[in-house]
Amino acid sequence: MTAAESLSSLGPYFAVRADPAPPTGFRPLPELYGAGGPLAARIAEVGRVLGTGEARVAASTAHLGLAARLWSVALGTAVAAGRVPELAGAWFALPPQGPFDLWLPSADGRAATVETLEAAVLEGQLAPLAEAVRAVVPLAPGLLAGNAASALVGAARQVGSVPTLRARAAALARELLARPALAGTGAVTAPGGPLAFRRASCCLYYRVPSGGLCGDCAFTRPPGRRPGVRR
């Protein structure tokens, strides 16, 4: 199985467009985080779909999905191909729901190391994404960092469903979780066993009418829902 085949089998969060140029309707990825960009509309639509009137819940859920998309593409390519894709030159199309469509330039990117992944994803994409989300809906920085860590581990576990990629995916995830931006976001299992993570914060999904606790939640049971109380 080639690297491309390995990634294509992992699902839509790992897929990228291979057109020679950005397809019609796509926009440079930095516009996702810019003033007047589509982020506010995306958050509102997520809230509508979830059936919640709590803007914080919708914003956290939207952020988690966007972070998962970015980690999936970057970590998957790093593990399968040994390169970090040039996300700074990416273009996107953002549907109301589901993972956003992504076009990447044809350049191979830099050699995959924890430093290049940190620069490309944590600093280059997730930092401005968090700032943009907080400009729409005030959320605690620790919650958004926890979302970024949770999305990273989820991507690594999915990459690890390909046995030949499992060890490298887990090793990179553990190294990234130790970087300053993600340090303290939760507890990760030690090397030598399956990759698992329990975050130190909550993404607030339990507050969705039909929601519950995520598998890596800091809580062991849903806190009581009291309207108007920030959690």
Image (cartoon, grey):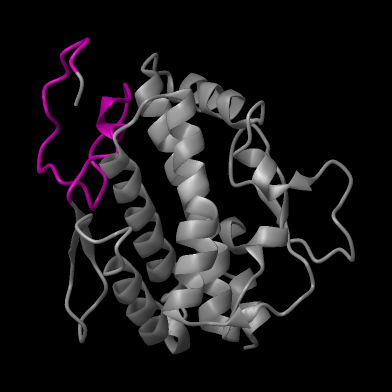
Please say whether residue 228 is one of the residues in the magenta stretch.
yes
User: Can residue 107 be seen in this snapshot?
Assistant: yes
- Name the side, left or right, on which 135 lies relative to 211: right
Q: Quadrant of residue 10?
A: bottom right
Nearest the camera: 23 or 51? 23
Residue at 54% x, 53% y: name it: 125
| Residue 192 vertical position relative to residue 136 in the rendered view, above or below | below
- Mark count: 0
Q: Quadrant of the C terminus?
A: top left
User: Can residue 10 be seen in this snapshot?
Assistant: no
Nearest the camera: 171 or 48? 171
Q: Position of residue 174 (x, y in %)?
A: 29, 74
Please say whether residue 92 is one of the residues in the magenta stretch.
no
Q: Quadrant of residue 221?
A: top left
Dominant secondary-structure state across the stretch colored magenta = loop
Residue at 58% x, 65% y: name it: 73
Read off the magenta span. Answer: 200-229
| Residue 74 vertical position relative to residue 69 in the rendered view, above or below | below
Q: Quadrant of the N terminus?
A: bottom right
Residue at 47% x, 27% y: name it: 135
Nearest the camera: 92 or 222? 92
Nearest the camera: 130 or 5? 130
- Name the side, left or right, on which 137 lies relative to 197: right
Residue at 29% x, 34% y: name it: 140
Q: Position of residue 16 (x, y in %)?
A: 70, 62
- Name the side, left or right, on which 23 lies relative to 9: right
